[in-house]
Amino acid sequence: MNPFAGLGLPFVQHALLAGTSIAVLAGLVGYFLVLRSQVFAGDALSHVAYAGALAALAAGLDLRFGLFAATIGVGLVLGALGGRGGADDVVIGTAFAWVLGLGVFFLALYTTSGGSASNSTASVSVLFGSIFGISGHDAVVAALVAAGLVAVLLAIGRPLLFATLDPSVAAARGVPVRLLGILFLGVVGATTAEASQVVGALLLFGLVAAPAAAAQRLTDRPWRALWLSAALAVLSVWAGLALAYAVPAVPPSFGVVAVASAAYAGSVLLDLTRRRASSTTPATSAAASPPSIARR
């Protein structure tokens, strides 16, 4: 079987266009989330995405309106409530519980209002994604939105990195640390809404966090790790889609997250191997020194 045979199919091309652009965005945003220790915020926003989509469906609106409005709004609020634009665990945990309750409420409202009869798969699509079902128009829109968010992130990337690594010095230098933190969590919210189309609200945490965590283990240079995170996310999407196409029983979202998790596991093993090798180097050189002394 030719592994590239599916590239000529329109639904595969649409999936690759949307998936690649969203993966680049998720990888870049995910690296800053990991670096800023705000991974929990990303997880909370994934549940916000589900609640927002269900709220839009219950109101008879396009679910994407609910996705973006809820995640961006809650992301900005989390950033405003947290210290220096970075929401703390108490704020995030409180929002998490509140959003879960709203999700249950809107799910019940949607299923009892009669709207679920006309679109019975919408709730499942939001949870697990429907990348192979995305249309050409929606794929182009997703790519354009992702490109815009990447541009915003790169525009604030340097001061955001400064504010992340040393917020006190950055504030003293005039960097708007709090404003950058709020804006960043707004971008995270929009990224969450975008990534829901690929892996769904339930599993998007893996696409955002796993490649970034792997990149951070593979290199300690921030800019190299940033782009490595994006590359690993793209690789996860490509490999996951290829796996789902080759094995129809494998859902695309599972394939993407499985590859991303495998990349992280591989980075952990590589990091442990490297640490063991560096720790045994002094002992090896010390053991080799007596013969050289004897030769003298």
Image (cartoon, rainbow, N blue to C red):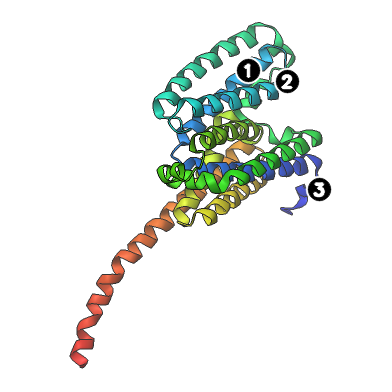
- What amino acid does circle 2 point to? Asp
- What amino acid does circle 1 point to? Leu
- What amino acid does circle 3 point to? Gly
Tag 1 residue: 54
Q: Is residue 217 left or right of residue 241?
A: left
Secondary structure at badge 3 equals helix
Tag 3 residue: 8
Q: Residues within 10 Å of mark 3 (few under 14, many from 20)?
A: few
Residue 19 in sight here: no
Secondary structure at badge 1 equals helix
Q: Position of residue 139 (x, y in %)?
A: 76, 37
Q: Position of residue 93 (x, y in %)?
A: 42, 24
Q: Residues within 10 Å of mark 1 (few under 14, many from 20)?
A: many
Q: Nearer the viewer, residue 197 or 261?
A: 197
Q: Nearer the viewer, mark 2 or mark 3?
A: 2
The disc at residue 62 is 2
Secondary structure at badge 2 equals loop
Q: Residues within 10 Å of mark 2 (few under 14, many from 20)?
A: some
Q: Nearer the viewer, residue 116 or 54?
A: 54
Residue at figure coordinates x 35%, y 60% from the top left: 275
Q: Nearer the viewer, mark 1 or mark 3?
A: 1
